[in-house]
Amino acid sequence: MSGFPDVRPRRLRSSAAVRRLVAETTLQPRQLILPLFVRENATEPIPISSMPGVYQHTRDTARKAVAEAAARGLGGVMLFGVPEHKDATGSGGLDPNGILNVAIRDAVSEAGDELLVMSDLCLDEFTDHGHCGVLDAAGRVDNDATLQLYAEMGVAQAEAGAHVVGPSGMMDGQVGAVRKALDGAGHTDTVILAYSVKYASAFFGPFREAVGSSLQGDRKTYQQDPANAHDAIREVDLDVAEGADIVMVKPALAYLDIIRQVRDHVDVPVAAYNISGEYAMVEAAAANGWIDRERAILETLTAIRRAGADIILSYWAAEAVHLLDRVR
Ligand code: PBG
């Protein structure tokens, strides 16, 4: 029996040097995007209790976070606005002086040549009912009336200097409507990162606190049913046909199979959003001493890359750069 087994996969795991040599999946700072929340009239950063370590920034601290993201070599930042006042049509999102557009201008002035400034293109942070679009007389989200507002919002964001806009409201036709409006206003170089595949997920929970959402109920009439995968392929096909430059799958962890299917199906870059609830779960378990926080972060990000995401949005993006330096 000596020499048995003949084949020993453990040989390639036997030292850090050999593990490094054969690692299939890499994670680089340029592939990571840091989401940032900027709160109107805030005078100091406000902690988000369900996302320990994440804040609603002031304009000033957001600028600092952008400069730091650039210094760390991240691919970009994704900006969200938290307005002081909301209304039925989310008008604060279209206002050139609304908090998101102001934050975009601030970020662009800090970003330098390599860091991309991206903005969430959706009305839910700005509507008093908390839905991603405007409501019709019956209280349903009105798809086509919402498209008109997204088109104007996209142009306002491009005018503020956003390099990339991220339509995230799951309205039918949103990518085409935004592309047409951008092109019509001369913003042919503004990139569309489409939240193409977005599931009606419980894991968005902490985000509701992060943006002070007033939503009652759920988004099941426009976000996808977690039971469905074919629907994801249909959504990415439509978005690519409408002009999406990059498609995104969201959430990430409960949908790694979807990320893989989308990656194998399309020929545009694929992003994944490692969302608020995924962040909160790891942070909560780590705070209890139940898991090793830093290992869990790197394992999470590596798994999302391995599933097929070229780009990852993560609240850990800036910290992950440090962790990567340490393991390299
Ligand atoms: C919509 C939007 C949401 C998130 C990003 N963009 C909320 C939603 O669709 O319900 C969630 C991000 C996260 O949970 O980290 N503006």
Image (cartoon, rainbow, N blue to C red):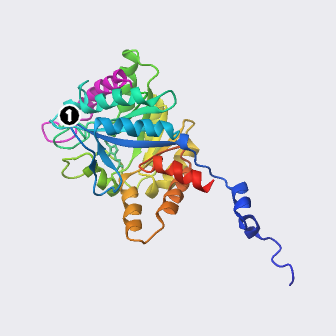
Kindly give the residue lying farthest to the bottom in the view shown. Answer: 1
Helix, strand or loop under label 1: loop
Q: Mark 1 points at which residue?
A: 90
Q: Residue at x 39, y 67 (%)?
A: 285
The amino acid type, in three-letter code, at marker 1 is Gly
In the picture, measured across the screen, residue 211 lies left or right of residue 240, that is left
In the picture, measured across the screen, residue 163 lies left or right of residue 216, that is right
Examine the structure image and report whether residue 155 is included in the region drawn in magenta.
Answer: yes
Examine the structure image and report whether residue 85 is included in the region drawn in magenta.
Answer: no
Is 168 or 146 nearer to us in this picture? Answer: 168
The image shows residue 190 at horizontal and vertical percentages of 44, 24
Q: In which quarter of the image is the N terminus?
A: bottom right
**Residue range of the region highlighted in magenta in the rendering:** 136-161
The image shows residue 325 at horizontal and vertical percentages of 58, 51
The image shows residue 224 at horizontal and vertical percentages of 36, 49
Beta carbon at label 1 within 8 Å of ligand 1: no
Is 200 or 100 nearer to us in this picture? Answer: 100
Q: Residue at x 47, y 28 (%)?
A: 112
Q: Can residue 321 be seen in this view?
A: yes
